[in-house]
Amino acid sequence: MVRWFTSDLSGTTGDRRVYVRGPALALGQARGHNLPVPSPPITPTDRPAASVIVPTYNEAAIIATLIRRLDDVRDRSGIDFELIIVDDDSPDGTAAAAHALEAPWVHVVDRRALRSLSGAVVDGFARARADVLVVMDADLTHPPEAVPDLIAAIRAGAPMAIGSRYVEGGTTDPRWPTWRRLASRAGSMLVRPIARTTDPLSGFLAVRRDVLAAAGTIRTRGFKIGLEIIVRARVRRIIDIPIHFVDRDRGTSKASAREAARFLLQVGRLYAVALGRIFATPRGPRADREPHA
Ligand SMILES: Nc1nc2c(ncn2[C@@H]2O[C@H](COP(=O)(O)OP(=O)(O)OP(=O)(O)O)[C@@H](O)[C@H]2O)c(=O)[nH]1
Ligand SMILES: [Mg+2]
């Protein structure tokens, strides 16, 4: 049975279906949010091996296929991960479509906050029970079959893993027009100096829960939550997992000129964070420095 969460974080997540259209979640609002670190109190045997978080907006046409493919992946890999779909009240009924599939490992968060992809992911982190957190798109551009490799990278000790189109063995969709290839490459090059991965704009990632603690406040206005975590948590060691990125063939992209502008603002903010660290000078005596003679 799919578990429906209330929009109130104090809501329970028992096996009985609880579907309450509550007030907006306090987490993940547009301005910024301290990433949730502690997981909900549960017994160790309840804890899944990983939590896969999927933000959705108008993905009713595709959500069943995603859940079925992830179910196959769970069967074949033997990894007991949970799926957390965080929907922003999609008018096309995405949340209801997920509910109709009734799977014990699938949870649907019915979000009632300002629409925000990153905000939805942050709320998904808050709901997640595992220490390994995976984020992916619903649109099947991120192959569900690569999820075990991302989880394995974290289990092998990496703080973060990225599903990369640009590492050796990875590919982008051959149907991509030239302008899109150039835009993707240019965007990646723009942030390469502050993010040590071949695909810093990828939305397909795995991260250890404790790494999020180091990220502090996450701005949920930006579209690129992976980049936000890399810079704010100063993640140095990232394992790139090659993926074959296949363009969506159902549903519509939410990427837009507005999101592109927001991306540039996000990049500006993150450069300020990264450069601020380099040029930061101590303002007063510091405990770890010798006093001036
Ligand atoms: N909850 C929530 N999910 C969102 C929102 N915007 C986009 N999404 C989801 O976030 C994921 C990424 O959005 P896409 O529309 O695929 O954007 P994109 O990956 O940059 O663009 P494409 O390359 O065209 O796929 C998808 O699963 C969307 O359904 C939002 O405002 N709220
Ligand atoms: Mg997408």
Image (spheres, rainbow, N blue to C red):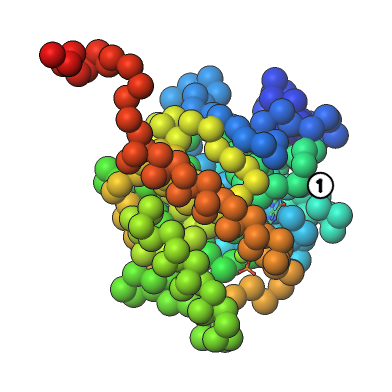
Residue 177 can be seen, yes or no: yes
Residue 76 can be seen, yes or no: no
In the rendered structure, the answer to whether residue 155 lies left or right of residue 51 reads left
In the rendered structure, the answer to whether residue 173 lies left or right of residue 123 reads left
Task: Return the x and y of residue 233 as percentages of the image width and height.
Answer: 40, 38
Residue behind mark 1: 89
Q: Residues within 10 Å of mark 1 (few under 14, many from 20)?
A: many
For this orientation, the residue located farthest to the front is: 293
Quadrant of the frame with the C terminus: top left
Q: Is residue 66 above or below residue 82?
A: below
Using the image as rendered, state which of residue 56 and residue 225 is in the foreground.
225
For this orientation, the residue located farthest to the left is: 293
- Image quadrant of ligand 2? bottom right
Which residue is at a point 39% across and 44% down the rendered structure image? 275
The quarter of the displayed image where residue 274 is located: top left
The amino acid type of the residue labelled 1 equals: Asp
Using the image as rendered, state which of residue 106 and residue 225 is in the foreground.
225
Which residue is at a point 81% across and 52% down the rendered structure image? 90
Task: Return the x and y of residue 154 as percentages of the image width and height.
Answer: 34, 46
The quarter of the displayed image where residue 105 is located: top right
Q: Is residue 187 above or below residue 101?
A: below
Which residue is at a point 73% across and 52% down the rendered structure image? 98
The quarter of the displayed image where residue 67 is located: bottom right
Task: Return the x and y of residue 31 as percentages of the image width and height.
Answer: 67, 36
Mark 1 within 8 Å of ligand 1, using the beta carbon: no
Which residue is at a point 43% across and 70% down the rendered structure image? 165
Q: Is residue 254 above or below residue 283?
A: below
